[in-house]
Image (tube, rainbow, N blue to C red):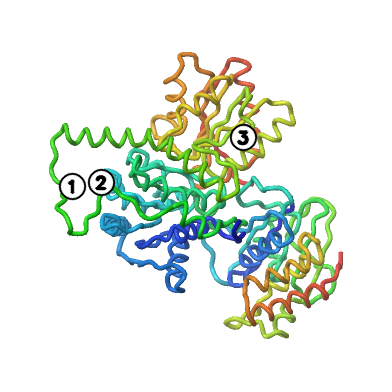
Amino acid sequence: MYEIVFVGRGGQGAVTAANILVEAALIDGLQAQGFPFFGAERRGAPVAAFSRVDDKPILRHGMFNTADAIVVLDNKLLNQDYISQFKLRDKGVLVLNTPYNTPPRDFKLRVEGEYSVYVVNATQIALKHRLVIAGWPVVNTSMLGALSKATGIVSKKAVLEAVRRYFSGRIGEVNAKATEDAYELTVRVV
Amino acid sequence: MGLKLVLTGNYSIAYAAKMARVNVVAAYPITPQTSIVEKLAELIEGGELDAVMIRVESEHSALAACFGAALAGARVFTATSSQGLLYMHEMVHWASRARIPIVMGIVTRTLGPPWNIWPDHTDYMDQRDTGWVMSFAVDNQEAFDLTLQAFKISEDPRVYLPVMVGIEGFILGHTTMPVEIPDQSAVDEWLGPRRQPYVIDGSDHLALGNLASPEDTEEFFMDIQNAMEEAKKVIAEVDEEYSKIAGRPSMGLVECFKCEDAKYLAVSMGAWSGDLKEAILQLRDEGFDVGLARIRYYRPFPAEQLYERARGAKGVVVFDRAISFGSAGPIFLDTLASIARYSRKTPYVKNVVAGLGGVNITSEDFSKIIRKFVEEVESDALVPFEWYHRRGG
């Protein structure tokens, strides 16, 4: 079983990312769950969404705070207290939306052992494709491309297909382009 | 075989109501139920479902509107949660005592105060004595299957009782999973047209809810009890027929998971049974002879099946996500009564109440509780009731 937490701000599409990941897992012939934080959330405030992916039926339910991959949709959340509730398992992967191609410093995310960090400038990709809603760059679909590159938990092909299914039409195509760009541009820095 | 869709538990219930081709939906929003009727409104608006959506001012009116439409011959659906379900409670009794088929989704959420939107079984258990058939799902696939089957069971002349289908809010309600949807044509053929004991459409004289003698009244209630007994057979039959169009095995009233030869039997209901199954697999690896009987139908209560599962066990541990304050968990009380009904020799039976107010219970918690239970039984030092509570993590 592979467990993933998406950390972002309310309105950035973390929950949508978790749900598209389920669609991608289904396309890859895997089992999956996706769900939001259980409770109320506010636009702009830090939020989390969760996914589980496995090749066997998933029996367990509910939120978790220790994950195999943590996808952060806004790099400024890394040094906020909010993120300290989450922990990366040994050999876990942090996937970060950031303008910097350097290892992140002073982060409050907890880690259990060895970890790797992958970065991508998803905000720039979103702006390039004019993926902006109410003034906010939409980075969730790009971060799914980055997650696929960093972990291989779902294939690039499945993520692209899932994005197209979820949004359909032109919006689906634009998002899929952003996902593909992010996949290509994601690099390991730690 | 039909489609495989990624759906939340709430959407799974909405899609089942759609495939049953409901004619009328009446609802009032409440967290965590709202997205069921939002999805139905969307399906109606988009022309995918030919039904009337009645927006009402309260849950009491929601079920009253469904009741009225059902009396007139419509296939109806509503859904609610928590305080909304309590507000509806009077009408819940009206529907069952009038023997009118209705299907309702219950997305469980605890009762306030304190104000809390997280799931347990408190609101659901409050409906225990209403005369509704009551099922509860373990995952989204089952939420879909039980809801679709609810229409067939409710409309069976041997039953003619309303049916409520429970899922926990958030844990299933807001969680997406792949769900297999059967072919509409196969569903149509299997479910058939609406059936009900009488129709109030002005073509005949019929009085409902008028004054009845004590004896007549009691006989009405005796009929409901008999219909519940019949419902046990109907539920098993319907599940069996449905398994053919769904292509999945039927389970009837109780799911047996590694329980055939279990020396220690766990009993539970709802999504946390999944976490409990994970614990059972882990404990089996450690050499514990443990299994699970999972309640799929709480009313009628599967007394015979539970007795059969429990009779060979040395110990039975019953997990409840609700409590009858001053007594114990409702499933425990029913389980104990079921075993005692058929035998004077009962195994050790323990009740663990946990997860109230939405406290997260994991497979590690279940493993810990069961290890301790086995130790208690083996040392003849059973703690018969335990409220398992923890904070954090």
Labels 3, 2: one chain: yes
Q: Place residue B183 in its image quadrant.
A: bottom right
Q: Place residue B129 in its image quadrant.
A: top left
Give the mark nearer the N terminus: 2 vs 1: 2
Marks 2 and 1, how far apart at CA: 8 Å
Locate residue B146, reporting x and y percent.
Answer: 49, 48
Q: Residue at x 58, y 21 (%)?
A: B313
Q: To which chain does the residue with label 1 belong?
A: B
Quadrant of the image containing the C terminus of chain A: bottom right
Q: Nearer the viewer, residue B182 or B13?
A: B182
Q: For this view, does B151 lie left or right of residue A71?
A: left
**What label sits on residue B209 in the rendered view?**
1
Res A167 seen here: yes
Q: To which chain does the residue with label 2 belong?
A: B
Residue highlighted by disc 3 = B257
Locate residue B28, reporting x and y percent.
Answer: 36, 62
Discs 3/2, front? 2
Q: Nearer the viewer, residue A60 or A44?
A: A60
**Amino acid type at image mark 2:** Ala
Question: Mark 3 Cα within 10 Å, few/some/many (few <14, many 20+)?
Answer: some
Q: For this view, does A71 lie left or right of residue B212?
A: right
Give the mark nearer the N terminus: 3 vs 2: 2
Contact (Cβ within 8 Å) of mark 3 with mark 2:
no
**Amino acid type at image mark 3:** Phe
**What label sits on residue B98 in the rendered view?**
2
Query: Relative to residue B91, is residue B385 depicted above or below?
Result: above
Give the mark nearer the N terminus: 1 vs 3: 1
Dot 3: element: strand
Marks 1 and 3, how far apart at CA: 44 Å
Locate residue B167, reporting x and y percent.
Answer: 49, 49
Q: Residue at x 76, y 54 (%)?
A: A68
